Image (cartoon, grey):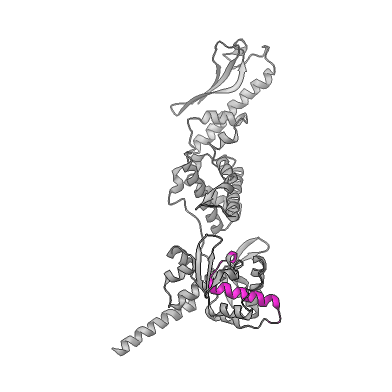
Amino acid sequence: MTIKFFIVKGKKKYSSIYIRFWDSNRIDQKVRTGINVEPKNWSISKQRIKINSSTLNVDILNSQLSKLEKFIFDNYNLEYNTSKHISKIWLKENVSIFFNRTSVDESSKVYFVDWVELFVKGAEERLFNGAKLKKRSLNNYSTTLSKLQAFENHSKQKLRFEDIDLTFHSKFISYCVNEEKLSNNTIGSIVSRIKTFCRNAEMDGLPINPKYKHRDFNLPKNDTIDTYLNDEEINLIYNHDFSSSERLDNTRDLFVIGLRTGLRISDLLRISKENIFNNVINITTHKTNQNLTIPIHPQFKSILEKREGKLPPKISSQKFNIYIKEICRDVGINQLTPGYKMDPETKRKKFDHYPKYELITSHSCRRSFCSVLFLSGDIDNSTIMAATGHKSIAQFTHYVKASQDEHIKKISEYWDRQNNKFDKL
């Protein structure tokens, strides 16, 4: 490994000081340092500006050259021996970094996280399926960027596009688990967005490492335990007398509408009389921009009649999530149920067995709607999917939940039907 400083004499009064770096046949590059000197003031033997020259700040400039030499030496040792890719412009990049000359535009063509930062800044104007990205997607992009930046600070390295390989994948996940204390599902979401960044970088013609497509560049996840309400529990909620509390009575009616339509909270709180015609709800979803038509359940119809055709007053999603827990508690939905709840001390979700009402959220509406119709056995999956807007069986079955008792009951009923057939033979 050799590092050499030299000048090339020309017709001009001043010559650029070059740095050349070579190591066997692996690398041989040269680039201007950006420091200039009169040829007569340059010492070829010492490879420095002569001390007795008329050049101002000789000591400072020579010190910079010495520090640059050590910087190049240390970086090469680190990167070559950790299997980092040494590009054709490696020396130029490192000289620019040393002198802090790399512009944002240039660095974004070399460094992955710098490019991601520009990508996130421009995300507000980016279109997906012809529409601007939702605020939630923008926030998710920003969160992923901050985790990448924190990882760089922790690992004390700047990630090039070539560095996004399986080694990065392993180290990044380890960092998220051990330092950030994130759950597997949260890490999986972050890795998914990193893969999105990689695809976009590749479309921009940047040298992203193709290993991001490898099957081992996967998304960590845990099997989720999602709580839903069965038909009997929904009927308990519908039939309970909340007349002593207008707050709970209004929320119960909204809750039942959500349980009987399967709408997300963002759509449930937007329903108006204009969305209802001939006992059918027609609404374009906020999240996926899909147009859904859902027949009105008799309980929904009864709520409208009770309110003289008006829908229950709207409340915030935060209040909705608080009040529906109170409603489920009051009607006696309190059996111990496995699930995850936020631990106020660790600020992380903790698995345990909790009273069921504590695990109910607005998303239980959608899961309950899918599960109740699926477990009825009377409606085919494609019909339910048309009402929920699920585009694939995989998406739909993720929402279908059933307790062990319900599976046992369903299978037992099937065996009984089979047994009756055999008895008739």
Q: Residue at x 31, y 89 (%)?
A: 424
Q: Position of residue 211 (x, y in %)?
A: 44, 45
Q: Position of residue 190 (x, y in %)?
A: 55, 53
| Residue closest to the eye, 338 or 415 | 415
Q: In the figure, is residue 259 to the left or right of 421? A: right
Q: Residue at x 48, y 75 (%)?
A: 373
Snapshot quadrant of residue 343: bottom right
In the image, residue 48 sits, relative to residue 285, either above or below, namely above
Asked if the stretch drawn in magenta spans residue 251, the answer is yes
Snapshot quadrant of residue 17: top right
Residue 146 seen anywhere in this rendered image of the structure: yes
The quadrant of the rendering that contains the C terminus is bottom left
| Residue closest to the eye, 369 or 270 | 270
In the image, residue 86 sits, relative to residue 417, either above or below, namely above
| Residue closest to the eye, 348 or 79 | 348
**Predominant SS along the magenta part:** helix
Q: In the figure, is residue 99 to the left or right of 184? A: right
Residue bounds of the magenta highlight: 243-266
Asked if the stretch drawn in magenta spans residue 11, the answer is no
Q: Position of residue 216 (x, y in %)?
A: 44, 51
In the image, residue 62 sits, relative to residue 204, either above or below, namely above
Residue 237 seen anywhere in this rendered image of the structure: no
Q: Residue at x 64, y 13 (%)?
A: 50
Q: Position of residue 226 (x, y in %)?
A: 54, 68
In the image, residue 198 sits, relative to residue 265, either above or below, namely above
Q: Residue furthest left?
A: 425
| Residue closest to the eye, 181 or 264 | 264
